[in-house]
Every structure is written in structure tokens, then in C-alpha cells.
Amino acid sequence: MNLKIVGIPGSNANHSYNRMLLEYISKAYEHDMTVVDVRKIPLFNESAKETPAAIQAMSDAIDAADAVVIACPETDHSVPSSLKSIIEWLSYQLHPFTNKPVLLVGASTDAQGSSRAQVDLRDVMISPGVNARVFQKEDFFMSFAQNLFDENGDIADPGTIKFLDKCLRDFECFAIANDQEVKSEEAALAKAEKEAAK
């Protein structure tokens, strides 16, 4: 099954190893993956009269996708404010993550990768209003990312490529199973509502 995937970089920096990681995944694997640009998205504002066009476009893309991959860096042992703000936009009036399979990955220039940030991000993604279905089987933390990409933006380390491939293949199975489960749940709900209306 060829999945349609949206990749969300967790950094709005012009140079981002997490964006590079998603771009590598996009070109190295057979699925149809679009990496969104988050660099001009304003901070979440509950008083905003309109949803920013970039957020609406991202929500529409997630709605139409089979799965989402979020590449999360780490700032002060937690999720960067730019990524948290995006999720807040997408859980206030819009809710595209509901029942959507989500894979969390991360790249960092330090030894422990983005491990603490990804733990926090899991809690954020399953919170009320977000309600994503976060893949739990594998954790992909890229440490010392500055040493792992070549001049073409490709991952040069065979061990990293092998483990990333395993994570993505396992996530593919999870996403397909999730799609079947959601359809089954929706059919059961529709049947229950029909019975209750009699």
C-alpha cells in the first residue's frame, strides 16, 4: 500500500537537521510524502479571528493523508515552542490529528538525541483535542546529526539507515492496521446510531 504522508519539521530554523531528516525520508522511501514548511507560521493566539492560511493548508493536508511523521528537535529538555504552537493551532478549532497514525522521530546535535522532547510530545499528541494515535513500538533518536548527513543531505551512516528503515516499515504496518481499525469503529458507531434512531 502506497501511503500518503505529511512530514512536519519541529523547528522553524532556516537550517534544521529535523527538516533534513524528513526530506531524506521523503526521497529515500516509496511512499508519497510531503514535507510542510513551518518557518512562517505565527505563534498560536486564541484570540485570532481567523486561522492562518498556512495552518488551514496544513490541516487540509493532514486530513487527506494516511499518516503523519513529526521530526522533533529538543529545546531545554522539551518540545520547541514553534512545534507546540503548531499543535495548538491544530487542536483548537481544527482537529486533523484525530485518529491519525503519527510517527515521532528526532534529530539532535547532542548525545541523547531528542529523547526527552519526544517523551513530552507523546503526551501532547494524545491529549484531548489532538487525539492522535502515536506509534509506540520504536523510538528513533538521531544523535550527533551534524556528523550523519553528507553534502547531499543523505544519511551516510549504514547503521542509522538500517534502524530508520525498520522504524518506517513497522510504522507502515501500524498505519495500515490503524486505517482498518478506524473504519471498523466508524462502521460500528454508524450502526449503533442507526439502531438508536429506530
Image: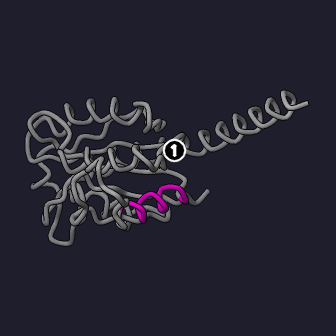
Comparing 25 with 156, the one in front is 25
Q: In which quarter of the image is residue 27?
A: bottom left
Q: In the rendering, at what x and y percent does residue 24 appear? A: 31, 62
Main SS of the magenta segment?
Answer: helix
Q: Is mark 1 on a helix, strand or loop?
A: loop
Q: Outermost residue toward the bottom? A: 152
* Stretch of the chain drawn in magenta: 55-64
Q: Is residue 35 left or right of residue 94?
A: left
| Quadrant location, the N terminus | bottom right
Q: Percent from the top left, x then y, of residue 85?
A: 26, 48
82 vs 137: above or below: below
What colouring method underlies this structural image? one colour
- Residue drawn at point x = 58 percent, y = 60 percent: 2
Say whether residue 51 is magenta. no
Point out the image quarter for the C terminus. top right
> In the image, what residue occupies the spot 18% across and 59% down?
12
Does 187 sit left or right of 121 as displayed?
right
Up the image or down, 92 lies above or below 155; here it is above
Residues 133 and 53: in front is 53
Q: Answer with the quarter of the image where residue 142 lies.
A: top left
Residue 102 vs 39, above or below: the answer is above
Residue 159 in the image, given as x and y percentages of width and height: 27, 46
Task: Please name the amino acid that badge 1 sits on.
Answer: Lys
Left or right: 116, with 196 as reference point: left
Mark 1 Cα-neighbour bin, 10 Å: few <14, some 14–19, many ≥20: many
The residue that appears at 13% across and 66% down in the rendered structure is 14
Left or right of 150: which side holds 140?
A: right
Residue highlighted by disc 1: 100
Residue 58 lies in the magenta-colored region: yes
Dividing the picture into quadrants, the one containing residue 143 is top left
